[in-house]
Image: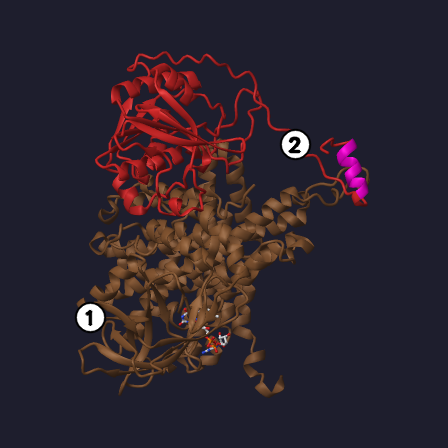
Chain colours: A red, B brown
Amino acid sequence: MKILTTVKRVEDYESKIKVRPDQTWIVTEGVNYRANPFDEIAVEEALRLRDANMPSEVVVVSVGPAAAATEIRSGLAMGADRGILVKHDAFVDSDGVARLLQKVIEQEKPDLVLMGKQAVDVDDNVAGQLVAEYLGWGQATFASKKESLESPEEKAKKPGLKLSADKKSVQAAREVDGGLEVLEVQLPAIVTVDLRLNVPRYASLPNIMKAKKKPIQELTPQGLSVDVTPKVKVLKVEPPPARTAGIKVPDVATLVQKLHAEAKVI
Amino acid sequence: MANPLFSDREVSFQLYEVHGAGDLCQLPAFADHGRETFDLFLASARKIARDVLFPAYRPMDAEPPRLEGGRVRVHPAMKEIWPRLVELGMTNATRPSEVGGQELPVLVAMFAGGYLSAANGAATAYAGLTAGAAHLVEAFGSEEVRRTFHEPMISGRWSGTMALTEPHAGSSLADVRTTATPMPAGPGRYLLRGNKVFISGGDQDFTENIVHLALGRIEGAPAGIKGISLFAVPRLRPEDGRLVDNDCSSAGVFHKMGWRGIPSIALNFGERGDCVGWVVGTPHQGLGHMFQMMNEARLMVGMNGVATASAAYHESLEYARTRPQGRPLAARDPRTPQIPIVEHADVRRMLLKQKAIVEGGLSLLAECARLADLVRHGPEEDRERRRMLLDLLTPVGKSFPAEAGFVSNSLAVQIHGGYGYTAEYLPEAWLRDQKLNSIHEGTTGIQSLDLLGRKVVAGGGDALRALAAEFAAVEATNEERAGLRAALEKIAATTMELAQRGLAGDRDGMLAHSVDYLDAFSVLVISWQWAKMAAAARRGLERDRASADFYRGKIAAARWFFANELPRVSTLCDICLTDASFVEARPEWF
Ligand SMILES: Cc1cc2nc3c(=O)[nH]c(=O)nc-3n(C[C@H](O)[C@H](O)[C@H](O)COP(=O)(O)OP(=O)(O)OC[C@H]3O[C@@H](n4cnc5c(N)ncnc54)[C@H](O)[C@@H]3O)c2cc1C
């Protein structure tokens, strides 16, 4: 089985993010980067499915600048087999990413594509859906684990996605209001993953050393014949409003009154 | 913002801009490594620290280990934490591949350990002790000892401890009494009998077995340190393919003010006369062997001191930025909003002092770690000089973070005001933890005797000359250079004078003020580290304007250290030479 996963290089949410004075984007100098946390969950799920269905292969793909090789390498250090970097320095919108991935997927012909449901930098939540649309494949979005993350299944590192015995379809549970919905999709398919699918592993030093020797192939938008001129334009970026100072109230009655009349939350 | 424990920017600055982690990869031993592997490893370590270890810190502090039915139960969080530490590689990362390691530079491993220690020092200590015990077995054990104990420890199936201290033998290890009687069964095996106290991780319930690296005396051995041997004493001993009880009993757990995630226990060997120990290395030379683990552990303790201070520094920094209180000195109008306390100069004084201690200490540990790497793998002709420097700096690397770190941890409480004094906030817990670092692995008093009585006078002052040569290599400003030179000369002259007293037989006259001497020496050494960091920051400012705030902060902390600490060297040196108040004071005068 061949599983392709995507990893986006995003700003580390632990770094202090500042908006550029001209409000066109954020200040990127001095910011730390990391792999999108949803994508780490996708890689983890891919590794579990691979290990339960040998022989299989996990390929990690990223679209981004040369530095995004770092995030691919971190997927390889978790245990993925090889990487593909579609190198492009400028901003690519979700549609551009989806069209690039479509081409990579057509070349690689994986049985399953696992993607984070969204990237924590811009939170668009569309790339997976667009890729499925462009390929004409089935999709299951927001895959979660049926069991909790404290369950014995998770402790035993069981995959949350259930592959059918003939390996022709996969079942994914997704959280919906008040319960779980279970979908079955024919392979090949796109599955986007939610936070509660698994707890991703940490790269161990021995695996980091092995990752050094794993290949990363470089592609370009031109080479894939995809025009990545953005269709979405970022007009303005604003920081969230600064927190205003709190107030002290003398008693509960006043608190309730203020929550009702001023804050309008009750 | 969540407490980062260490600033990632700081870590990359020290590794790559000050201490040349990248250059280490030019050495054949580290050829498989590069910045990429280092950064991936550090990323894993910091993630485990922040996601797994730190959330367990408070619960482990609140529910310390208990002795139940003769066994110690530790906090269940350790069952989750232990495999993560082992998988990451913390039991063996710096060892060569022939023995299952990855030949990671000590420098990089030290920083990874820093994140983990800052998140949860007690949890990290189990791995540090196991790594040290496994390294002892690897370095000195016979073929049988290595086969029996090494792989189980590095794979994390078994843990390791260091079992030195006895009720009457703490600082004075020469007085160790545990006895070892040769067994007819086989060469190298002994029956042990004795009582150990304060053994960290001496019992726990998350590994199958525990191996104590214990000091004892073979029957008939000479008195004093020349008669001490080292033994591997497992809690369960392998016999005919099974593990059987080896007569090591947990006699009690100490109720401690800090480090409450790891038990310190009273451990009895051979109550039933059935405790087997395997001798490790040469009989009667056990203390010398043990020094390998003790020297590693001293740097680990130093790193814990830095880490404990670092976590508290970041906590108080965030607090100072968000706690509104008072108004600027010039604005007394009560209708104006209150300002965050970081706007008060005195709060910035406390923050800058913490920063100077934490980052100065970190830089010294990095210096020591790099020396350890070069002693093992650097150019042959420099190894002796570097070994001497490492020996000289080790007592400082152990004690400065502990002593100055305690001051820094106290400032973190202070910045939190009344809230800092409550258990609702973390700084009080870190203050309790920090205190241990000036006690275990040789008290500050013992470190100071090691420095003044042994290390600075070794080779007729060669070590001090080697240090002076290091100072000369720093691209310091003229002012920094003059300050460093004056302090170094003062210390050299004081050392000479004290050594002469020693040679003349006046040991008290030489050593009574050893702790003050250590204090002065530490200030000198940390000033050197700040000069190095300031030089790197000046270079950084020219190259990378985006990090200007970071570099300006560095230069400010260096200025603080030179202005506030370096002048103390001269006073302390004078005190070492002139004050005899307590030397002459009689016990009955108190
Ligand atoms: C939490 C904890 C964990 C520990 N973990 C371990 C462990 O895992 N393994 C282990 O073997 N030990 C361990 N220890 C023991 C520790 O190393 C000793 O407590 C320490 O070495 C001091 O010994 P002591 O307690 O007997 O104090 P003492 O040696 O009695 O010292 C008391 C005071 O006298 C001073 N003093 C003693 N001798 C001299 C001297 N010659 N000159 C000047 N001053 C002197 C000391 O500096 C100190 O201030 C641990 C201790 C604690 C508290």
Up the image or down, B279 lies above or below A75; here it is below
Residue B411 shown left or right of residue B473 in the figure? right
Q: Residues within 10 Å of mark 1 (few under 14, many from 20)?
A: few
Q: Which mark is residue A242?
A: 2
Tell me the chain of label 2. Answer: A
Identify residue type, mark 1: Asp
Residue B62 percent location from the top left of the image: 55, 60
Q: Which residue is mark 1?
A: B240
Q: Are marks 2 and 1 on the same chain?
A: no
Would you place residue B309 above or below residue B452 in this image?
A: above
Q: What is the quadrant of the C terminus of chain A in the image?
A: top right
In the image, taking residue B582 as reference, residue B136 lies left or right, namely: left
Quarter-of-image position of residue B300: bottom left
| Residue A158, horizontal then vertical, whole percent | 35, 42
Count of all numbered marks drawn on residues in the image: 2
Residue at image point 26% right, 22% down: A109
Q: Secondary structure at mark 1?
A: loop
- Camera-side residue of B215 and B291: B215
Q: Which subunit holds the residue at mark 1?
A: B
What's drawn in magenta, residue-wise?
A253-261
Q: Tell me if B191 is positioned left or right of A260 in this view.
A: left
Q: How far, Cα to Cα, is label 2 from label 1?
A: 69 Å
Magenta span: predominant SS is helix
Quadrant where the N terminus of chain A is found in the figure:
top left
Residue visible at 40% across and 23% down?
A128
Which mark, by number, is residue B369? none
Residue B528 in sight in this render: no
Is B473 on the left or on the right of A167, as rendered?
A: right
Q: Residue at x 54, y 69 (%)?
A: B574
Is B59 or B105 nearer to us in this picture? B59
Type of amino acid at the residue the image marks with label 2: Ala
